[in-house]
Image (spheres, rainbow, N blue to C red):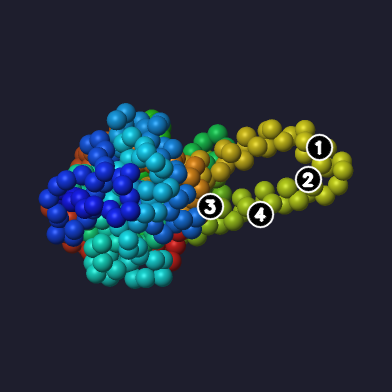
Amino acid sequence: MPFAAATAQGLPRVRPLQGQRSREARRLHRGAAVAAVAVDTLGADRGVAEVVAGAVESAAGSSLGHAGRILFGPLDQVSAAAGDPLPAGVELVDAQDFIANDEEAARAVRARPEASIVVAAEAVASGRAAALVSAGSTGAALAASLLRIKRIPGVYRPAVAAQLPLPGRQVLLLDVGANTEVRPEHLVQFAYMGAAFCEGVLGVERPEVGLLSVGEEQGKGTPEIVAAYEQLAGASSINFVGNIEGDGVTAGGADVVVTGGFAGNIALKTMEGTFRAVTGAIRDRISSGTASKLGGLLIRSRMRGLRAQLDPETVGGAYLLGLRSPVVICHGSSSRRAIANAIALAERGVTENVVGAIEQSLQSAGVVRGGGSATSDSATRPSVLADSVEVH
């Protein structure tokens, strides 16, 4: 749907575009290219300016060539952070309202169409933007995406997929927070969606896919895991390697590790906490005495490289798989570097047509929901942890 323009008082440097006023009376300033990434600037821990800085920095290295950045947020704050003159290809949409982490996401999204995340999701749904990136409330981003962008026809539930930046190998873990309870058919779809993403965006040919469980043997795990195992084990269209125990996730037991959102989020947070604890302990030991400090100087460059490799900000954010357009959710405390990397990740999803690849994979495997409709199975009432969870 077209965005309307209105004159911004006290902002003469921003040239408003003329156009028909939409029913929400949104204000659009300065044009960008057709293939753009919508960026919600509100709700991040470090404020609007940090998100805007990451979006502006990412524009120069865009994989979409002439792609732009549509930044949604308070016009005065976003404009001041973006600079004067406004960088080429950067577009501003005034959105004063935002949905906080402690609000009931689905209800707030329905009740407040002017909230920045809702307006940004609508821009993607209407074709004004090709992808969405947000560092605000994860629950609001998920609810707005479900209600505005909607799911790929035939998909039961979307899944939040997090890349684990492990030494020598990236592992995709999903779901890490979108669905507290899952059925076997949900897990099967997660497996195919994760494999399609891993192959298209991460460049892994015929990725190995495993189910997170309490034992490697078939028959171990919850009834849902056992049933999903039986379906995946008999499929030739996916490289299923069986069950993966917790230590196998970081040991590279599979390229794609599939689980429900409850267990997935706990696994993700446990790994993040362990990483912080271990790196903190190493840092403390190195600085504990003269000899250890000298040894630390000798290994500093190598440790810096390892730290960068393991840094979640290198990835940027988690992908929301199963929607009709790419959506990337960033951690609330993301720096401008993480925001820029998240936008790059969203763009790779566009250039590699990950949505089309997922749809084709599900259709070819015959695991789509009956009839291919995307209007039932809690489409507008998502079962999410995301109201209280932030995802790396």
Residue beneath disc 4: 277
Image location (x, y in percent) of residue 335: 50, 48
Marks 2 and 3, the one that precedes in the sequence: 3
Where disc 4 sits, the SS reads: helix
From where the camera sits, is residue 392 visible? no
Ranked by sequence position, the earlier of labels 1 and 2 is 2
Name the residue rendered at 76%, 51% in the picture: 284
Q: Position of residue 201 (x, y in %)?
A: 37, 35
Q: Residue at x 26, y 43 (%)?
A: 15
Tell me the SS state at disc 2: helix
Mark 1 and mark 2 in contact? Answer it, CB < 8 Å: yes
Return the residue at label 3. 246
Q: Please report whichever mark, 1 or 3, sits nearer to the chain's N-terminal start.
A: 3
Label 1 vs label 4: CA separation?
20 Å
Q: Amino acid at mark 3?
A: Gly
Judge depth for marks 4 and 3 and give the one in front. 4
Q: Disc 2 marks which amino acid?
A: Ile
At x 41% / y 66%, what residue is drawn? 101
**Residue 295 - label:** 1
Say if 145 sits above or below 233 in the image: below
Q: Is residue 278 positioned above or below 239 on the image?
A: below
| Marks 4 and 2, the one that precedes in the sequence | 4
Q: Which residue is mark 2?
A: 286
Inter-mark Cα distance, 4 to 3: 18 Å
